[in-house]
């Protein structure tokens, strides 16, 4: 007997006309495009058991390119999520997914680190004294910078939150950090096939931590955290979500334009990679480009696929834990597109995209520097106008 989830999946996929728009949009290899068509055909035939045993739906970055190009408007990304959830119910979670879910439940982080380790990145921010650091963590403020797991816990990503702090201080922004009170947003659980309800406690805790600071605004540097805060938390908490959540690409352009910050004026050429969760899924396309345009001497040369049509970096959907080779292949394809622009810098606004693309650049020995836009801005500040924690 079919479950309600199975019936929903089969009902939605029945309108598929096998046009191939989804598979041709997939950022994976040609072989993966073929298996994607096979997946939808099996679903149309009602072969749920065959689909689950194939595990094809785990080889997905959940980038949503297939979904926005589907002429029938089939919620393909949602279907992938439901298949993962169904797989967990019927067969049991994959070992890698079980491991990360356990760490999230026990430590509230994707690495299993103790809560106080979320502050390690703050220990070597240039020009900030221990007293100032303590105030950033303990003071109440109008705005909270939610750092996220990658920025907080992966040393190769530390420079991103450090740059954010430098920029906010230069703008004399009243802000605070959650520090050890910050929990993961919960996304890896959803990508691993856990139900939405599994992250409700994460939503409640993080919202309370922000409100305890007296803050009305949350700034994030991770597009996935942005997605979870603005969409999933709103669904789970309803009217309790009475705060404003912004990605830094939305928050900073007007602040920088109206500030008296001085920037280096040497001429450089950059290209910009739109993260899937920020551009395609959230529609934040123009703001990062406004931020780049605000920097003197910086010329933006666009890649062939930009905005909502931007190709995925290969780092989404927990794919690296499932098929790291496929993830790398997708990233290398995107780097090849960046190299076509002859840019000196490949910029993005996502720490996961930066990490994935940087790894692809290193593996392919490409001559281009990968930066998060925060790092790029912070390096170009020549004379900060502020910088004092009040």
Image: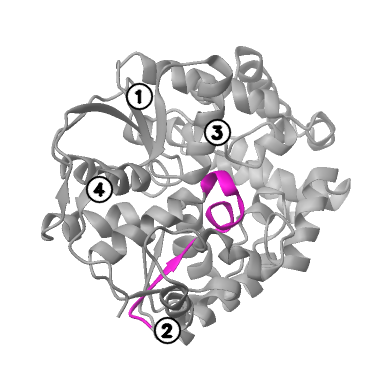
Q: Which mark is residue 305?
A: 1
Which circle marks residue 356 in the picture?
Answer: 3
Residue at label 2? 139
Which tag, 1 or 4, sits closer to the chain's start?
4
Give above or below for 333 relative to 297.
above
Of callouts 3 and 1, the N-terminal one: 1
Q: Residue at x 54, y 15 (%)?
A: 364
- Alpha carbon of mark 3 to alpha carbon of mark 1: how far? 18 Å
The residue carrying mark 4 is 287
Label 4, label 2: how far apart the Cα atoms are: 30 Å
Q: For mark 4, give the secondary structure.
A: helix
Query: Can residue 155 be found in the magenta stretch?
Result: yes
Task: Look at the numbered disc 2 and give the secondary structure of its residue.
Answer: loop
In terms of sequence position, does the residue under pointer 4 or pointer 2 come before the other? Answer: 2
Q: Secondary structure at mark 3?
A: helix
- Which of the two discs, 3 and 2, sits closer to the camera? 2
Classify 188 as above or below 300.
below
Please say if the residues under marks 3 and 2 sit with CB atoms less than 8 Å apart: no
| Range drawn in magenta | 141-157
Q: Is residue 295 magenta?
A: no
């Amino acid at each position: 007997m079919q479950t309600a989830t199975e019936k929903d999946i089969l009902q939605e996929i029945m309108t598929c006309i096998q046009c191939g728009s989804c598979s041709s949009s997939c950022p994976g290899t040609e072989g993966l495009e073929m298996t994607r068509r096979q997946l939808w055909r099996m679903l149309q035939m009602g072969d749920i058991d065959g689909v689950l045993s194939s595990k094809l739906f785990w080889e997905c970055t959940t980038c949503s390119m297939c979904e926005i190009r589907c002429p029938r408007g089939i919620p393909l990304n949602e279907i992938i999520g439901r298949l993962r959830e169904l797989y967990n119910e019927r067969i049991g979670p994959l070992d890698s997914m079980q491991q990360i879910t356990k760490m999230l439940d026990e430590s509230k982080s994707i690495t299993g680190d103790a809560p106080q380790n979320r502050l390690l990145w703050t220990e070597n921010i240039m020009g900030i004294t221990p007293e100032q650091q303590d105030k950033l963590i303990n003071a109440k403020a109008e705005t909270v910078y939610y750092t996220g797991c990658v920025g907080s816990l992966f040393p190769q990503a530390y420079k991103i939150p450090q740059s954010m702090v430098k920029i906010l201080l230069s703008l004399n922004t009243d802000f605070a950090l959650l520090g050890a009170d910050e929990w993961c947003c919960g996304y890896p659980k959803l990508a691993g096939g856990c139900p939405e309800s599994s992250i409700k406690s994460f939503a409640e805790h993080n919202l309370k931590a922000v409100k305890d600071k007296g803050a009305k605004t949350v700034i994030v540097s991770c597009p996935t955290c942005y997605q979870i805060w603005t969409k999933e938390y709103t669904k789970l908490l309803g009217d309790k979500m009475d705060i404003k959540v912004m990605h830094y690409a939305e928050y900073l352009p007007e602040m920088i334009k109206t500030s008296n910050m001085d920037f280096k004026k040497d001429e450089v050429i950059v290209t910009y990679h739109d993260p899937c969760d920020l551009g395609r899924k959230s529609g934040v396309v123009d703001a990062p480009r406004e931020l780049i345009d605000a920097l003197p001497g910086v010329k933006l040369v666009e890649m062939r696929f930009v905005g909502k049509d931007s190709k995925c970096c290969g780092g989404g959907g927990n794919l690296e834990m499932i098929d790291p080779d496929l993830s790398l292949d997708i990233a290398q394809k995107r780097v090849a597109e960046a190299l076509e622009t002859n840019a000196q810098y490949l910029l993005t606004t996502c720490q996961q995209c930066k990490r994935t693309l940087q790894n692809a650049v290193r593996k392919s020995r490409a001559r281009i520097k990968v930066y998060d836009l925060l790092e790029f801005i912070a390096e170009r500040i020549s004379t900060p106008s502020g910088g004092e924690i009040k």
